[in-house]
Amino acid sequence: METLINMQTNEKIYIAGHRGMVGSAIKRRLEKAGFTNFVTRTSSELDLRNQAAVEAFFAAEKPEYVFLAAAKVGGIVANNTYRAEFIYDNLMIQNNVIHQAYVHGVKKLMFLGSSCIYPKLAPQPLKEEYLLTGLLEPTNEPYAIAKIAGIKLCDAYRSQYGADFISVMPTNLYGPNDNYDLQNSHVLPALLRKFHDAKEKGDPAVTIWGTGTPLREFLHADDMADACYFLMQQYSEPGPINIGVGKDISIADLAAMIRKIVGYEGELQFDTTKPDGTPRKLMDVSKLTGLGWKASIHLEEGIRSVYKEKF
Ligand code: GFB
């Protein structure tokens, strides 16, 4: 296939959110490809919610490419608890970065979203065209609305100004630099921590939130970053493009897999006072695979590697 954009390894790349799981994976992938000219700021050095600060940053640094991986993120309970922060912070961050990328003539910007942008009860697997065809999952509606606004912002700047801004929607992710906080994290790191701690302490049971029946798809952050690098060069269209593996697993089966990996021998208990969230979120990845990209890290293998690295 013909490459749309030939990014040169000395061109200046701004990765917003370079210390997070997503941004750090993208940085590793670009470094592996030989890129050297990165501009980064921690959140204490640059508050992306601050319009004047973001404007000054772009004016001073003038990056040529932008990966917008900075966001307020978390698992189902964090999304449902910090509802104001999830919508406000994310809208502010993306408005500021996307607008300044346009003002300062960034050659290409990639906006990262999430599979929760699709309607709660959309047909499965989730095709990109299901966006805005139904009501969202209530627990993460503020986050999803912000991410949908980001997609529409990129599309509007593309159609009015001809900006080459694309939106990619990864499925549920795991990998290095994930958040392992038991209240605010996503299910996969939370279960690794819960099983590990229970094994260490000799606890007789581990508590899994919800019924265990929801189905989720999990992609290793390194696979996601590889897809982002591929899409940055090969893709230039409005609307979201899904990044996933095209295969899902129930939370109960995921728990059983993690229990085995950790080597925990106690019981599983299900706390049904905690929310299940969307019953199923399986990405249709035919658009991405049609372009020639496929995930390569097998789930069990990927979990083993993050477990070994973290604990
Ligand atoms: O990973 P998770 O928080 O995100 O939860 P979502 C997935 C499923 O795992 C839910 C169950 O059914 C949870 O109830 N679960 C079981 C647990 N035990 C645990 C646990 O100890 N911790 C957590 N966190 N879950 C988020 C969205 O939804 O996914 C975001 O809220 C975003 O907006 C993100 O899209 C990728 O897949 O339900």
Image: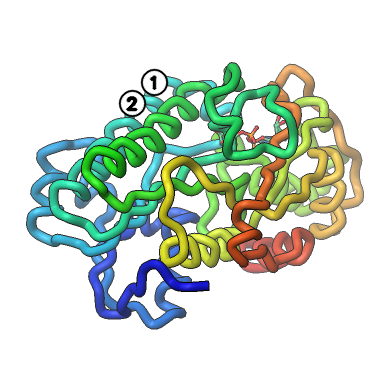
Q: Secondary structure at mark 1?
A: helix
Judge from the rendering whether residue 99 lies leftward or rightward of residue 217; answer left or right: left
Q: Residue furthest bottom?
A: 34
**Is 20 placed left or right of 291 in the picture?**
left
Q: Nearer the viewer, residue 278 or 270?
A: 278
- Decide which of 154, 193 is in the foreground and name it: 154
Residue under numbered circle 2: 88
Q: Are marks 1 and 2 in contact (CB under 8 Å)?
A: yes
Which quadrant of the figure has residue 307? Answer: bottom right
Query: Percent from the top left, x then y, of residue 232?
Result: 42, 62
Dot 1 amino acid type: Ala
Figure quadrant, ligand 1: top right
Residue 279, percent from left and from top? 75, 27
Residue 84 shows which numbered tag?
A: 1
How is the protein colored in the picture? rainbow
Q: Residue at x 54, y 62 (%)?
A: 227
309 with respect to 159 (left or right)? right
Provide the secondary structure element on which disc 2 rests.
Answer: helix
Res 40 visible: yes
Residue 41 got which mark? none
Whether residue 93 is visible, yes or no, is: no
Q: Residues within 10 Å of mark 1 (few under 14, many from 20)?
A: few
Report if the beta carbon of the residue with label 1 is closer than 8 angstroms to ligand 1.
Answer: no
Rendered location of residue 308, percent (x, y): 68, 67
In this view, 13 is above or below 126: below
Task: State the CA–CA distance, disc 1 to disc 2.
Answer: 6 Å
Q: Amino acid at mark 2?
A: Tyr
The residue closer to the viewer here, 123 or 281, is 123
